[in-house]
Amino acid sequence: MDLSWSDSEEAFRSEVRGWLEANAPGPLPSGDTHEGFARHLEWEKLLFENNWAVVSWPKAYGGREASLWEWLIFEEEYYRVGAPQRVTQNGIFLLAPTIFEFGTRSQQDYYLPRMAGAVDLWCQGWSEPNAGSDLAGVRSKAQRDDAAGGWVLNGQKTWTTRGAFCNFLFGLFRTDPESERHRGLTYFMVPLDTPGVTVRGFGRLDGDEGFAEVFFDDVFIPDNVLGDGGAATPESMAKGGILGEVNQGWGVAMATTSSERGLTLRSPGRFQATAARLLDLAAESGGPELESSLGDAVTDAWIDAEAYSLYTLKDVSGIVEGVSPGARSSYNKVFWSELDVRLHEAALNILGPAAEVDGPWMKGYEFALSGPIYAGTNEIQRNIIAERVLGLPRK
């Protein structure tokens, strides 16, 4: 693994840094509030207008056709200047890689530019009241209506991040009523303004309001209809449809979860920037005079952030050579989610009682606590690692 950057990559870094330093906004309200979400969208539209929203995508979809290495550089610089977290992440970082892999050309041509430009905003419909981390236990169903040429959806999704602000949902529905577990599931893309869809937002304990429950009551989703030219029309794409094959949704969903747990959702730059802020806080709070245990926690957290970066570089080296991380993405998920907690715990311990009035670190800590839960709880991820990576027997 070559840890040096080429001249062209350093030139890319310089261009990214210059633009971000000139244009990145200051701190914005939380993207999980109505005001904050709107402010974040203004920023993300500016990114798109300047071809920075999706640097690794084809130019036809608003990208720069940057390499994965350049994407990592962009992420480092993005978080280094303190640019806002991306509220379009469910679409850009989770759904988009799945559309690139499983979508038809018509789906790619329609959804991807609108996703990159923050025109269509996506939420993820995985969790249900009785199927949180157990994704294969979903009960929401889709029944075939041959006469109408489509599917009728019924059921409920919950803990839908930013669902109150989005206009599209992607998720799994059971299309084979006789099936069990991961069989007989289909991956649907559903416009949330479709008749029969009810989105009910609810507040979190921290006051943010982006979470939602989504109810489906005889919601009709038509087949992916071809137009005269052999491609689906924008009008048909706007009505949603199926990604991949009917009853083969589990494999499609696993591609999305691999993105969610692995490379794209949580780049190293995010944690390296937090570790740098932690070092600054430690220096401001006593530096060498800092209590030994606090200093050790800061050191360990910084080392772990660097270790995650090196692990990611190794992963990218494999991806470039055609090796998919597969189930190994669960390693990533466990590590980055617990690293995020450690980084923020170290900061709060340094701040002491002042942590209660330090907005950014406390807010970051509250969010970090959800990391071991979303994207599949870490207990489930450890089972996946044991069984699918290490080959250990089921208990």
Image (cartoon, rainbow, N blue to C red):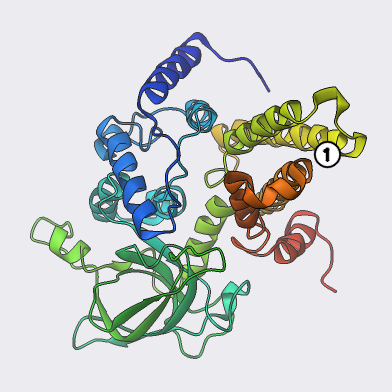
Residue at 77% across / 46% down in the picture?
A: 352
Residue at 58% across / 79% down in the picture?
A: 131
Q: Position of residue 100 (x, y in %)?
A: 38, 48
- Residue reaching furthest right? 292
Q: Is residue 328 visible?
A: no
Q: Position of residue 172 (x, y in %)?
A: 45, 73
- Could you tell me the amino acid type at mark 1? Ala
On the rendered structure, is 46 left or right of 291?
left
Q: Position of residue 88 (x, y in %)?
A: 39, 50
> Which of the image's four quarters has the C terminus?
bottom right
Q: Secondary structure at mark 1?
A: helix
391 or 20, nearer to the observer: 20
295 or 68, nearer to the observer: 295
On the rendered structure, is 224 left or right of 130?
left
Residue beneath label 1, please?
297
- The image shows residue 211, relative to residue 388, as above or below, that is below
Q: Position of residue 260 (x, y in %)?
A: 55, 53
- The image shows residue 321, relative to residue 257, as above or below, that is above
244 or 156, nearer to the observer: 156
Residue at 43% across / 69% down in the picture?
A: 171
